[in-house]
Image (spheres, rainbow, N blue to C red):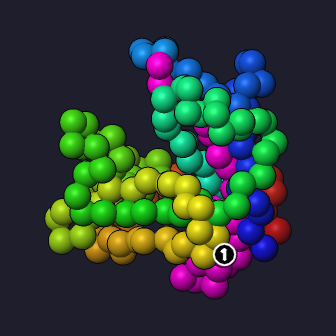
Amino acid sequence: MNSKVLVVGDSATGSAIVVSPKNPEWGYVKLQQSKVSVDDNGFLRRNVLTALIKAPVDILKEMNYYHGQVLNGTLVIEESLEPFNKKDPNRDLKVAGATGIVCKLDDQPIYRRVIYRDNPNAANKTIEHNNKEELREAYNAAKPSAIKPNQDFAI
């Protein structure tokens, strides 16, 4: 029930290739895929994944990418205990929702990214975090207090 991988054009220009504002020789193409899966609690979930293909602009142009193009392959989640970006190790930290808390395995941060693989059978590489108590406390602290019924609406 997964959708195809689609090239998504820039919303302002419609062009599939976005040129880097820092270096006009480099750019990227944005990809998107909707995936359906059953989570650990048995709930059916739809997730929309996005990834970038980065390369010199001339190579991206040679590939003739266009908005709406369907690519063979899949988008996969890749997690690691080593940073993907050595210059900016905080860039790809796996964060638990709106809590801002980094998911960890034995006090080691987990890094997460989504990448394109041209193999349609490529699988996710995930790491289960074990700082669940820290996350549970944060979620409980963020919950609004229970709503007390108004006497006017009491039965």
Majority secondary structure in the magenta region: strand
Please, which residue is most extreme toward the left here?
107
Q: For this view, does 77 lie left or right of residue 120?
A: left
- According to the picture, the residue beneath numbered tag 1 turns out to be 37
Q: Return the x and y of residue 145 as percentages of the image width and height.
A: 51, 55
The picture places residue 26, in percent across and down from the top left corner, at 47, 25
Is 112 situated above or below 42? above
The answer to which quarter of the image holds residue 30 is: top right
Magenta residues span: 25-47
**Disc 1 residue crowd, few under 14, some 14–19, many 20+, Cα 10 Å:** few
Taking depth in this image into account, of 65 and 39 the one nearest to the observer is: 65
**Coordinates of residue 63 in the picture (x, y in percent):** 65, 39
**Residue 88 within the magenta-colored segment of the rendering:** no
142 or 49: nearer the viewer: 49
Q: Residue at x 30, y 50 (%)?
A: 84
Instruction: Determine which quarter of the picture holds residue 81.
Output: bottom left
**From the image, which quarter does the C terminus lie in?**
bottom right
Residue at x 49% of width, y 71% of height: 124
Tag 1 secondary structure: strand
